[in-house]
Amino acid sequence: MATISLCMIVKNEEKVLARCLESIKNAVDEIIIADTGSTDSTKEIAKKYTDKIFDFKWVDDFSKARNFSFSKAEKDYIMWLDADDIISKENCEKLIQLKKNLENEDVVMMKYSTAFDENGNSTFSYYRERLIKKSFNPIWKGRVHEAIEPGGSIVYSDIEIEHHSVKTEYSRRNLNIYEQQIKDGEPLLPRDLFYYGRELYYHNKYDKAIKTLSDFIQNKNGWVENKIEACRILSYCYRSIGELDHALFALFNSFSYDLPRAETCCEAGSLFMLKSQYNQAIYWFKLALELPNNEQNGGFNNMDAQGYLPCIQLCVCYDKLGNHTEAEKYNNMAGEYRPSSAAYLQNVEYFNSLHQRGVF
């Protein structure tokens, strides 16, 4: 049976660290904690699960911290988690079974779910390199949004890791690191450009985000899924400054990379709704319902955009056009995806009132 070293970097994670380690402890053979300067009880909590706790001076570089933690690993495979990640009991059992069958695999990709509906069901996921053979000599790259370039024998597992953050606001930390990197004269690689542009958008720096994302899109290098996502974020920027036509053109540019994504179609539909062009919006929302999910590409997979979201928006569009029968039909379809959704339940009351008044 293969053995696993869990390697984590942490700082001031007293609210979530025990939850994370408790969920994974039965599946790993050693736990390594690299603490980057905690001032709360993080290290005391970690000591309940491991004696392999190391201090690492934070230097505004996630890759250096992760590589330090990986350097301490002694088992066959290395696994990483963030402190606000968890693995369910079912998926933990799958990981234990996986250990029994690992032989020559270099990298195991696992689904990473980062958004959830009101019932805790995943609505957004993508694959990450989660388990790497130590002899593969994995190296993290990138000061922010660090990654290991997969290679060798790669396996896609159905094991799911869940990200449940308890943070209530988005900090400037990542943006500051990128800006320091620029000041230091270290060039931004294509992947850095994408994430830097996204950080700029998150912090409402739309003009600069538009320039950065456009530079990334025009660059010949870069992962195609990031190119498609960059087109969407560029569209969000234009939408935020009221340039709806430019927002649409940015979305349509993504079609040059691959078949339309459901999330892109939903965004196009929402832009046409803003322009009160409901028939055009209906076209895009219906197209979103017809598209397959993106799991087979290893890319970003927005489950809401493949069912619930287009249905709830089609309900609004048909209602705006006075077609209450179609509107109610699509609201009922939305309820099949998310029966506890506040929007769906509110619409049920709305249609019940229309029926009572004999509107249709």
Image (cartoon, rainbow, N blue to C red):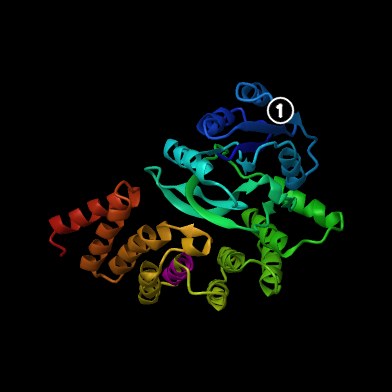
Screen quadrant of the C terminus: bottom left
Residue closer to the observer: 222 or 4 = 4
Percent coordinates x, y for residue 355 in the rendering: 15, 58
Quadrant housing the N terminus: top right
Query: Mark 1 sits on what residue?
Result: 53
Look at the image and tell me whether residue 263 can be seen. yes
In the displayed structure, 10 sits above or below 317; it is above
Q: Which of the pair 349/298 is nearer the observer?
A: 298
Left or right: 349 in relation to 153 = left
Spot occupied by residue 287 in the image (x, y as percentages of width and height):
38, 72
Could you say where residue 254 lies in the image, as x and y percent from the top left? 55, 73
Above/below status of 288 relative to 143 = below
Using the rendered view, name the quadrant where residue 208 is placed: bottom right
Amino acid type, residue under disc 1 in the picture: Ile
Q: Is residue 320 left or right of residue 110?
A: left
| Residue 136, placed above or below residue 194 | above
Per the image, is 229 magenta?
no
Q: Position of residue 67 (x, y in %)?
A: 74, 44
| Residue at x-position 49% and y-position 48% | 113
Closer to the camera in the image, 94 or 263:
94
Magenta region: 263-273
- Residue 172 shows in the view: no
Who's the residue at 78% across and 38% down the image? 58
Image position of 276 (left or right of 196): left
Label 1 crowd (10 A; few <14 / some 14-19 / many >=20): some
Residue depicted at 69% across the width and 74% down the height: 218
271 drawn magenta:
yes
SS assignment at label 1: strand
| Rendered residue at 52%/64% (across/down) | 297
Question: How many labels sit on residues?
Answer: 1
